[in-house]
Image: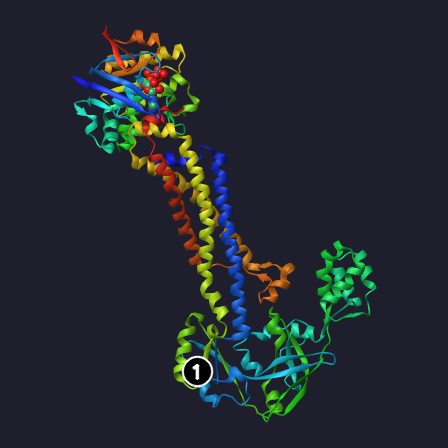
Amino acid sequence: MITSTAWKNVWRNKIRSLVVIISVTIGIFGGVFAVAVMNGAIEQRLEAALNTELGHIQISRPDFRENFDIHLRLDSITNLDKKILELNGVEAVTHRTIISAMANTATKSTGVQVIGIDPVQDKQVFSLGDKLIPGTGSYFADSNKRNPVYIGEDLAKELNIIRYVIAPATIDSLRNRDVPETVLSKLDGYQGRRFRNQASFTDALKDTLTKKEASKYGRKITEEAWSFRTRTRLTLTFLDRNNVQTGGMFRVAGIYDIKNKMYESSHVFVKNSDIGRLTGLGNEAFHKAVIRIGDIEQTRNITRQISENFPDLEVRSWKEISPEMAMMNDMVEQFYIVFMIIILAALAFGIVNTMLMVVLERTKELGMLTAIGMNKKRVFRMIMTESVFLSLIGGVTGMIISWGIIALTSRNGINFVKYGEGFEAMGFSAHIYPDISITFFIIVTILIVVTGILSSIYPALKALRLDPADALRTE
Amino acid sequence: MKVLEIKEVHKIYNSSEVKVHAVNGISIDFEEGEFAAIVGPSGSGKTTLLNMIGGLDNPTEGKILVNNTDLSTLKSSDLIDFRMKNIGFVFQSYNLIPVLTAKENVEFIMNLQKRSKKERNERTMELLNAVGLGERAESRPAKLSGGQQQRVAVARALASKPKFILADEPTANLDSKSTETLLEIMEELNREEKITFIFSTHDNRVVKKARRVVTIEDGKVISDETR
Ligand SMILES: Nc1ncnc2c1ncn2[C@@H]1O[C@H](COP(=O)(O)OP(=O)(O)OP(=O)(O)O)[C@@H](O)[C@H]1O
Ligand SMILES: [Mg+2]
């Protein structure tokens, strides 16, 4: 009876209740969805970092990290592999030769880290091969060619390997992408010109295109004008095993894009055999072994086991290599919950406020109910039930909408490409797949119920303090 | 048998500056089956007295015994229960719960008392029929006239079979036709069911129907006549 009366009371002032319910719904949805986007971005970033940059566990000689001395190599690799692969949870292991070098093209030069790999083996740990920009070549597919190098998009831009040109084919593809003729005819004038980077290209576009055209079609035009010189020569200069400067001429075999400018501009991949020959270290000179494990929750455990097996080597998990990643991974859940608590607290004030209004409005009725024998416990329960209804209806609707929209958007992701530059500079993908854990979902639902109950206490107490004689005298 | 004894009751309101002696030493008894009106000019202390009789307010001095129980000896939670079982209230402004139907309003207390559904139904319909609203059982208060709402209020007051019904100016908001109907119903309940009614009023037509008239002025009984 109290419950059903409370339910009916909720709908007594339909508009007011709906406003509260809708604001709770929007608040919850906004919070949960924002968390899902943040979480999706962070998880993708973590995934990307683990799959393309860090691996799960790295092994090297203790001092290698400090001085990158090319003589600090791992001994008896076969034995090492065997022991590691025997451990439960280890999926694959790869080895890398790591050399600091200068990369030069005809026009530019920059410092890089040259990583020598066995492409087939490396692919079992890292997914760099999948990050190839289509049309830029391959990930070491042509095994006969000598000295192929696989470089990042950002380095390619720095070294002017990527440039922007308007060719007849560019105009055609833009026409297919619904760019109007008026714009296309303006682009004709750019044919034959080469732009060394995106900035100079977009600047040049601004000379002829109107602001509106530039903002509407600018992205399509840069995408289509993007091109690169195939098989560009790249000279890598480094020190050999006797500390004598040496180097080699490499050809760009492919360009990868992992949405992390810092990494892209400083890591180039070559075949281990090529670098071994040039440095004189030979084929079996590896500075690092990188391990992939099945379950990332097992990181600590497996890292410890490996350390015990190889007391003379430095064994570091991704969490130690990249503490900021580890912190992100460990702290996000707490952060999200604090974030939701703040949103819920704001909503609680809305509910408290509404319910106080309710109590004030119904002073006389509540006095009457006490007069005819409804005891304090029941009055308290009725007001409390009402507020819990308010927050639950809004909260549950918000959760259902969030769940639905997250399910929808997580399939194809949301494209923030417009703001992509900023994202990618920080290593985040601009194409985000919102994602949230079931645990978080359950915790938030519980928090909503708790909020509903907590925010009902004060108004219900107010109702209790009413003196029936006074309450009945109010008009 | 005495259902209500009021012994030397005083009520002093100590609001900020002024001290109001709203009830100033009243002693009266009521027998079972009475149909009594409390009359007096505005501000004479009628509402204050009825509130104290109903246990909604405490006397500053004096004693009130309902069915031989001294209200001042009851804890506030017991007092609410005691009220529910022994005293029925009818208010000037009906005070029905607007979201519930007539039937649900009458049932409300029985529901809190956890009476069986069958018992609730029978009693509710019996009471609504008694006040002539059997047909309107499913109507919400907003769909009823003031007189009809007040009759539902009487039915509600009777639901828990109280010792007596206190009604503070039950007809003040009603037109003369509704007033007449309500009084007829009250008289009939009093006559047939031996329900005790104690009501305050300003209205001379209502006073005429009362079998006992207690007149108070300035918080004192100035006359008490039984006809
Ligand atoms: N809560 C209160 N605080 C202070 N004074 C009060 C309070 N309630 C009533 N009074 C005063 O007590 C006196 C008696 O009031 P009461 O309401 O009992 O009169 P009444 O006979 O019911 O009048 P009416 O016919 O207008 O309803 C009045 O002077 C009133 O102002
Ligand atoms: Mg009064």
Whether residue A329 is situated above or below residue A268 in the rendered picture: above
Q: Name the residue under label 1.
A: A84
Q: In which quarter of the image is the C terminus of chain A?
A: top left
Which amino acid type is marked by label 1?
Answer: Ile
Chain at numbered mark 1: A
- Residue A14 locus on image (x, y percent): 48, 34
Whether residue A177 is situated above or below residue A98 in the rendered picture: above
Q: Quarter for ligand 1?
A: top left
Q: Is residue B152 visible?
A: yes
Picture quadrant of residue B149: top left
- Residue A17 locus on image (x, y percent): 47, 37
Q: Is A232 on the left or on the right of B103, as rendered?
A: right
Q: Is residue B128 visible?
A: no
Identify the residue at image location x=36%, y=38%.
Answer: A460
Q: Is B24 on the left or on the right of A470, as rendered?
A: left
User: How is the protein colored in the picture?
Assistant: rainbow
Q: Which of A367 and A252 is in front in this view?
A: A367
